[in-house]
Image (spheres, rainbow, N blue to C red):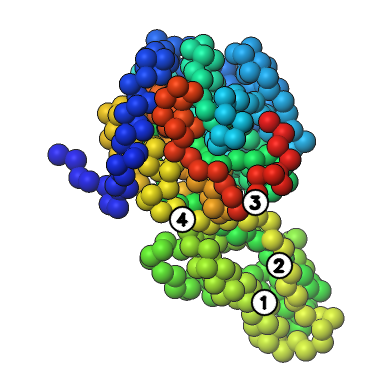
Amino acid sequence: MTMPVKDAPFLEERTAAVMESVFNDPIVKKALEQAVPQEIFTIEEQIEICEVPAPPMKEQTRAAMIAEKINSYGLEASIDPVGNVIACRKGTDPDGPVCVISAHMDNSFREGTDTTVRRQNGRLFAPGISDASRALACMLQVIRMVVNNDVKTKGTLLFIATVGQEAEGDLRGVKRIFYSSGIHVDGVLVLDGADPGRLLYGSVGSKRYKIEYSGPGGHSYLNFGQYPSATQALCRAGALLANLQVPAEPKTTFTLATMSGGSSVNAIAEHAECEIDLRSEDPQMLDGLVQEVLPLFAFGAQLENQRWNVTDPALQVRCKVTPIGHRPAAVSKPDSPVLQAARAAQMALGIELTEYMSASTDQNVPMSLGIPSTSLGAGGREGFNHSLSEWFEPVRSYEGPQLCLLTALALVGLENGADPMLPIYTAVPRAQWQDRL
């Protein structure tokens, strides 16, 4: 017996009616059915994508590959100034909504990592085989389903393979789309993760900083008690951080992620540094956490200077804080059209809602701007993501492309069928956008 997922969105009457109309459309049914026999090809394409290197900040080779594939499937792909691959399937209504379907291209592994895929007991093993090779393969399958069956929509479908989702990428690809590209977007479906039963209502925001301590240094024995230590200042601050109390709801977290410093075992450290990661799905809570945490590191330097009674500024340990990443936080209401459409599509396809939660994906940026957004699983099962033991199992994995297509079609509407569920984003008047579709 399965337990109901807490706070799952309740379907509105209009949502059910739109989904029934879309799901029963003969052309849509044919497109959905295509996903099943073509899943064998999709899996092989997933493997091919995985074996093309795409370490953080170096996605160019994979981007060229994805663009070539999209062109071969009947859409015209282009690569923007930061490396995103963009392709458009225009709707029949020039004033209809624009829905983005996206997947990120980068993985979380350093350059030179062996991503050769091996098969064992029905599973595929390789770094990046699921995250995000599966999502890219799923997006390509959706393109084939639309083009091969000539699915005509009222609104426009915009397919984007983004850069910079992982590690130090800091969402640079999706930030380019929504902060400076001038492309008008009304809704976003991000393909991320495998489980098609997972639905994201919130975006876990993060703010990341590099903390650096610098001081005069000295001999560990001869200068003991004369000069403060950069590494000890960092340790003092780290201890303060470790004892910080944060709320359980909304979940708010802190991590002292990396530490380094010192030059020799017999030297008072001249330099030490660390990186910290602060997270919450509540924007105000995240900002409050920043205001509480950053002073702890300055206080660490102060405590170290006081411990050795160093009052000369030239001899004191100093603290420098540099922002290195910001993923905006946001939460959607249950009546968000993308949540409504996605939940209705799950129900139509017989996919159980397994998780209704927040996470950090490319959805963070559009959701924080008030653009209806969510993330959908690309199908199958996965494990040990972001590790060298990462695996993917293609169990009913065709459900990922089916779910994505059905959700998107409900949002943009069909030419001779249901009207779009997705409203036009009006925070910025449409006429002010440089529409480059």
Residue type marked 2: Val
- In the picture of the structure, the residue carrying the numbered disc 1 is 298
Q: Secondary structure at mark 1?
A: helix
Left or right, 360 with respect to 266, comes to left
Residue type marked 3: Val
- In the picture of the structure, the residue carrying the numbered disc 2 is 321
Tags 2 and 1 in contact by the CB under 8 Å rule? Answer: yes
Identify the residue shown where x is 39% and y is 37%.
Answer: 342
Question: Against 190, is 366 above or below?
Answer: below
**Disc number at residue 386?**
none
Quadrant placement of the C terminus: top right
Identify the residue shown where x is 74% and y is 37%.
Answer: 82
Left or right, 376 with respect to 290, comes to left
Q: Secondary structure at mark 3?
A: loop
Disc on the earlier residue, 4 or 3: 4
Tags 4 and 1 in contact by the CB under 8 Å rule? Answer: no
**Disc number at residue 331?**
4
Disc 4/disc 3 C-alpha distance (Å): 20 Å
In front: 345, or 307? 345
Quadrant placement of the N terminus: top left
Q: State the image coordinates of residue 399 (x, y, percent, origin top left).
A: 37, 24
Q: Nearer the viewer, mark 2 or mark 4?
A: 4
In front: 251, or 175? 175
Query: How many numbered circles are shown?
Result: 4
Question: Against 249, is 26 above or below?
Answer: above
Identify the residue shown where x is 81% and y is 80%.
Answer: 315
Disc on the earlier residue, 2 or 1: 1
**Disc number at residue 428?**
3
Disc 2/disc 1 C-alpha distance (Å): 9 Å
